[in-house]
Image (cartoon, helix red, strand yellow):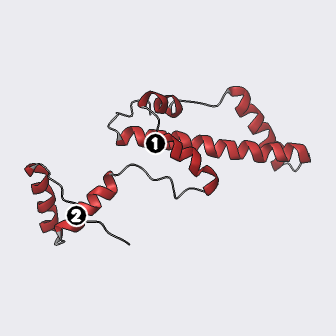
């Protein structure tokens, strides 16, 4: 992994917390700082299937209100009923080819929908918003 050198001024209290952790774990302070940055960094989206990456990457640019709308969004009852109907027909091996294609599309959309909701919630949390809707 390539590395970069960064000079950073941090408050003494944060430095002391990191230094105490490094001593307690018998690790170099640099390792503790890198780990803190990894944990505290914005959520990644590049480990999801490629077909969803552009949608998740676009969320990084949204303001908090837009992210809240996504995080709090739901599928309509009609959408869920149709999806469940097709799932039942598929389970019973009583599904037409057209319905099978529709089910595949609905499953893909459901995956995208849930990934976007989760990413929006993760971004809001990272930005410091309280997740009171959960």
Q: Position of residue 19 (x, y in %)?
A: 12, 62
Q: Is residue 115 visible?
A: no
Q: Residue at x 33, y 58 (%)?
A: 38
| Viewer-nearest residue: 134 or 92 | 134
Q: Residue at x 75, y 38 (%)?
A: 83
For disc 1, the neighbor class at 10 Å (few under 14, some 14 to 19, many from 20) is some
Which residue is labeled 2 in the image? 32
Relative to 105, residue 26 above or below: below
Kindly indicate the quadrant of the structure image that contains residue 16: bottom left
Image quadrant containing the N terminus: bottom left
Q: Position of residue 91 (x, y in %)?
A: 81, 49
Q: Would residue 129 appear left or right of 56 to someone viewing this image?
A: left
Image quadrant containing the C terminus: top left
Which residue is labeled 1 in the image? 60
Relative to 120, residue 76 above or below: above
For disc 2, the neighbor class at 10 Å (few under 14, some 14 to 19, many from 20) is some
Q: Is residue 60 visible?
A: yes
Kindly indicate the quadrant of the structure image that contains residue 132: top left
């Amino acid at each position: 992994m390539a590395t970069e050198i960064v000079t950073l001024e941090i408050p003494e209290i944060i430095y002391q917390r990191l230094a105490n952790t490094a001593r307690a774990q018998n690790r170099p302070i640099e390792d503790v700082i890198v780990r803190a940055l990894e944990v505290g960094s914005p959520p990644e989206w590049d480990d999801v299937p490629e077909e969803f990456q552009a949608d998740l990457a676009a969320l990084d640019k949204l303001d908090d209100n837009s992210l809240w709308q996504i995080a709090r969004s739901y599928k309509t009852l009609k959408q869920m009923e149709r999806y469940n109907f097709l799932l039942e027909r598929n389970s019973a091996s009583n599904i037409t080819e057209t319905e099978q294609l529709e089910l595949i599309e609905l499953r893909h959309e459901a995956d995208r929908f849930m990934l976007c909701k989760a990413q929006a919630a993760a971004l809001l949390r990272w930005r410091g918003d309280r997740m009171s809707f959960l």
